[in-house]
Amino acid sequence: MNIKMNSEDDKKVNQQSIMVPMDDMDKVSSDSPNTVDELAMELATIQQSAKRIAIIGSRNLPITHQQMIETLTTALVTQGNTIITSGGSSGTNAAAIRGAMKANPDKLKVILPQTIGQQPSDVQNQLIGVPNIVEHSDRAMMTLADASRVCNREIIDDCNQLICFLSHTSKTLHNAVQYAEEGHKVITVFYLD
Protein backbone atom coordinates (compact mmCIF):
# COMPACT_ATOMS: atom_id res chain seq x y z
CA MET A 1 0.00 0.00 0.00
CA ASN A 2 1.38 3.34 -1.02
CA ILE A 3 0.70 6.40 1.11
CA LYS A 4 0.79 9.60 -0.76
CA MET A 5 1.44 12.84 1.14
CA ASN A 6 -0.08 15.99 -0.18
CA SER A 7 1.93 19.19 -0.43
CA GLU A 8 0.56 20.46 2.92
CA ASP A 9 1.95 17.41 4.72
CA ASP A 10 5.29 17.87 2.92
CA LYS A 11 5.55 21.40 4.30
CA LYS A 12 4.89 20.21 7.84
CA VAL A 13 7.54 17.52 7.62
CA ASN A 14 10.12 19.88 6.14
CA GLN A 15 9.63 22.67 8.71
CA GLN A 16 12.58 23.25 10.98
CA SER A 17 12.53 24.12 14.64
CA ILE A 18 13.95 27.33 15.94
CA MET A 19 16.01 27.07 19.09
CA VAL A 20 15.97 30.00 21.51
CA PRO A 21 18.96 30.13 23.85
CA MET A 22 17.68 30.42 27.40
CA ASP A 23 20.93 31.56 28.99
CA ASP A 24 20.67 34.95 27.21
CA MET A 25 17.30 35.77 28.78
CA ASP A 26 17.12 38.75 31.12
CA LYS A 27 17.28 37.71 34.70
CA VAL A 28 15.27 39.45 37.40
CA SER A 29 17.39 40.28 40.39
CA SER A 30 16.02 40.29 43.91
CA ASP A 31 16.60 44.06 44.25
CA SER A 32 14.72 45.03 41.06
CA PRO A 33 11.22 46.53 41.42
CA ASN A 34 8.28 44.16 41.10
CA THR A 35 7.25 44.77 37.50
CA VAL A 36 4.09 42.68 37.92
CA ASP A 37 2.89 45.07 40.65
CA GLU A 38 3.79 48.09 38.50
CA LEU A 39 1.89 46.70 35.53
CA ALA A 40 -1.09 45.89 37.75
CA MET A 41 -1.10 49.47 39.06
CA GLU A 42 -0.91 50.90 35.53
CA LEU A 43 -3.71 48.61 34.35
CA ALA A 44 -5.88 49.64 37.30
CA THR A 45 -5.25 53.30 36.48
CA ILE A 46 -6.16 52.82 32.83
CA GLN A 47 -9.37 51.00 33.78
CA GLN A 48 -10.55 53.66 36.25
CA SER A 49 -13.68 55.37 35.05
CA ALA A 50 -12.56 58.78 36.33
CA LYS A 51 -8.90 59.73 36.45
CA ARG A 52 -6.84 62.73 37.48
CA ILE A 53 -5.07 63.62 34.24
CA ALA A 54 -2.25 66.15 34.10
CA ILE A 55 -1.86 68.00 30.81
CA ILE A 56 1.33 70.01 30.39
CA GLY A 57 3.42 71.04 27.44
CA SER A 58 4.96 73.60 25.21
CA ARG A 59 3.81 77.21 25.03
CA ASN A 60 4.83 77.52 21.38
CA LEU A 61 2.12 75.67 19.51
CA PRO A 62 0.35 76.35 16.24
CA ILE A 63 -3.34 77.08 16.59
CA THR A 64 -4.27 73.68 15.11
CA HIS A 65 -2.40 71.87 17.90
CA GLN A 66 -4.04 74.10 20.49
CA GLN A 67 -7.46 73.27 19.04
CA MET A 68 -6.69 69.53 19.22
CA ILE A 69 -5.60 69.83 22.88
CA GLU A 70 -8.72 71.83 23.69
CA THR A 71 -10.94 69.22 22.04
CA LEU A 72 -9.12 66.35 23.78
CA THR A 73 -9.45 68.08 27.15
CA THR A 74 -13.16 68.74 26.63
CA ALA A 75 -13.69 65.06 25.80
CA LEU A 76 -11.68 63.89 28.84
CA VAL A 77 -13.67 66.12 31.20
CA THR A 78 -16.96 65.05 29.61
CA GLN A 79 -16.00 61.46 30.47
CA GLY A 80 -15.70 62.46 34.14
CA ASN A 81 -11.95 62.98 34.41
CA THR A 82 -10.34 65.84 36.35
CA ILE A 83 -7.73 67.87 34.47
CA ILE A 84 -4.70 69.27 36.29
CA THR A 85 -2.55 71.86 34.52
CA SER A 86 -0.77 75.15 35.07
CA GLY A 87 -1.51 78.67 33.88
CA GLY A 88 -0.52 79.83 30.45
CA SER A 89 -1.54 82.55 28.07
CA SER A 90 -0.91 80.38 25.04
CA GLY A 91 0.02 76.84 24.18
CA THR A 92 -0.78 73.56 25.88
CA ASN A 93 -1.87 74.79 29.32
CA ALA A 94 -4.10 77.53 27.93
CA ALA A 95 -5.77 75.07 25.54
CA ALA A 96 -6.32 72.59 28.39
CA ILE A 97 -7.90 75.31 30.53
CA ARG A 98 -10.24 76.38 27.70
CA GLY A 99 -11.27 72.78 27.01
CA ALA A 100 -11.97 71.94 30.64
CA MET A 101 -13.87 75.19 31.22
CA LYS A 102 -16.15 74.36 28.28
CA ALA A 103 -17.01 70.93 29.67
CA ASN A 104 -17.10 71.43 33.46
CA PRO A 105 -15.08 74.05 35.37
CA ASP A 106 -15.37 72.00 38.57
CA LYS A 107 -13.26 69.27 36.91
CA LEU A 108 -10.30 71.63 36.40
CA LYS A 109 -7.44 72.24 38.82
CA VAL A 110 -4.84 74.88 37.89
CA ILE A 111 -1.61 74.83 39.87
CA LEU A 112 0.39 78.02 39.38
CA PRO A 113 4.17 78.14 39.68
CA GLN A 114 3.84 81.29 41.81
CA THR A 115 0.88 83.62 42.54
CA ILE A 116 -1.88 84.95 40.33
CA GLY A 117 -0.45 88.44 40.79
CA GLN A 118 2.87 87.31 39.28
CA GLN A 119 1.17 86.01 36.14
CA PRO A 120 0.93 88.18 33.02
CA SER A 121 -2.40 89.99 32.67
CA ASP A 122 -3.57 87.68 29.84
CA VAL A 123 -3.05 84.64 32.11
CA GLN A 124 -4.87 86.40 34.95
CA ASN A 125 -7.77 87.10 32.59
CA GLN A 126 -7.90 83.48 31.46
CA LEU A 127 -8.09 82.29 35.08
CA ILE A 128 -11.22 84.34 35.81
CA GLY A 129 -13.96 81.86 36.66
CA VAL A 130 -11.63 78.92 37.34
CA PRO A 131 -12.91 77.61 40.71
CA ASN A 132 -9.85 75.59 41.75
CA ILE A 133 -6.56 77.50 41.57
CA VAL A 134 -3.53 76.70 43.70
CA GLU A 135 -1.09 79.56 44.22
CA HIS A 136 2.41 79.47 45.71
CA SER A 137 3.49 82.68 47.39
CA ASP A 138 6.42 80.73 48.89
CA ARG A 139 7.92 80.62 45.37
CA ALA A 140 7.60 84.36 44.77
CA MET A 141 11.36 84.91 44.94
CA MET A 142 12.21 82.01 42.62
CA THR A 143 12.83 82.52 38.91
CA LEU A 144 9.83 81.54 36.80
CA ALA A 145 11.88 78.69 35.25
CA ASP A 146 12.70 77.21 38.67
CA ALA A 147 9.17 77.70 39.96
CA SER A 148 7.80 76.03 36.80
CA ARG A 149 9.99 72.96 37.32
CA VAL A 150 8.70 72.60 40.89
CA CYS A 151 5.16 73.22 39.64
CA ASN A 152 5.42 70.45 37.01
CA ARG A 153 6.45 67.99 39.74
CA GLU A 154 3.53 69.06 41.92
CA ILE A 155 1.12 68.59 39.00
CA ILE A 156 2.55 65.13 38.28
CA ASP A 157 2.39 64.11 41.95
CA ASP A 158 -1.33 64.99 41.93
CA CYS A 159 -2.28 62.91 38.86
CA ASN A 160 -2.74 59.28 37.82
CA GLN A 161 -1.87 59.96 34.20
CA LEU A 162 0.27 62.50 32.34
CA ILE A 163 -0.30 63.80 28.84
CA CYS A 164 2.58 65.93 27.62
CA PHE A 165 2.97 67.89 24.38
CA LEU A 166 6.60 68.76 23.70
CA SER A 167 9.44 68.98 21.23
CA HIS A 168 12.55 66.80 21.29
CA THR A 169 14.62 69.76 22.49
CA SER A 170 12.46 70.65 25.51
CA LYS A 171 14.70 69.74 28.45
CA THR A 172 12.26 70.91 31.16
CA LEU A 173 9.39 68.83 29.77
CA HIS A 174 11.64 65.79 29.20
CA ASN A 175 12.64 66.05 32.86
CA ALA A 176 8.96 66.18 33.81
CA VAL A 177 8.22 63.04 31.77
CA GLN A 178 11.17 61.26 33.40
CA TYR A 179 9.86 62.30 36.84
CA ALA A 180 6.44 60.85 35.91
CA GLU A 181 8.09 57.60 34.80
CA GLU A 182 9.88 57.35 38.13
CA GLY A 183 6.52 57.86 39.85
CA HIS A 184 5.01 55.03 37.77
CA LYS A 185 2.39 57.26 36.15
CA VAL A 186 0.61 56.32 32.94
CA ILE A 187 2.25 58.60 30.36
CA THR A 188 1.27 59.74 26.88
CA VAL A 189 3.79 61.92 25.08
CA PHE A 190 3.07 63.83 21.86
CA TYR A 191 6.14 65.14 20.05
CA LEU A 192 5.36 68.22 18.04
CA ASP A 193 8.48 68.29 15.86
Image (cartoon, helix red, strand yellow):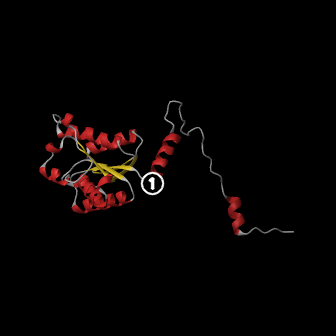
Task: Give the structural element (helix, strand or loop) at label 1.
Answer: loop
x, y percentage for residue 127?
20, 52
x, y percentage for residue 96?
28, 55
Residue nearest the observer in this picture, 60 or 52: 52
Taking the image as shown, residue 66 lies to the left or right of residue 78, namely left
x, y percentage for residue 179?
35, 39
Residue that numbered label 1 is attached to: 49
The residue lying furthest to the top in this view is: 31
The residue lying furthest to the right in this view is: 1
> What residue is drawn where x is 45% and y is 51%?
46
Residue nearest the observer in this picture, 151 or 13: 151
- Give the quadrant of the C terminus: bottom left
x, y percentage for residue 105?
29, 55
- Give the quadrant of the N terminus: bottom right
Taking the image as shown, residue 77 lies to the left or right of residue 45, namely left
Amino acid at the residue labelled 1: Ser
| Residue 193 in view | no
Residue 175 sits in which quadrant? top left
| Residue 188 in view | yes
* Image height of 155 relative to 130, above or below: above
- How many numbered callouts? 1
* Image height of 95 relative to 35, above or below: below
Residue nearest the observer in this picture, 43 or 101: 101
> What residue is drawn where x is 22% and y is 48%?
87
> What residue is drawn where x is 38% and y is 54%?
81
Residue nearest the observer in this picture, 158 or 65: 158
Circle 1 Cα neighbour tier, 10 Å, few/some/many (<14 / 14–19 / ≥20): few
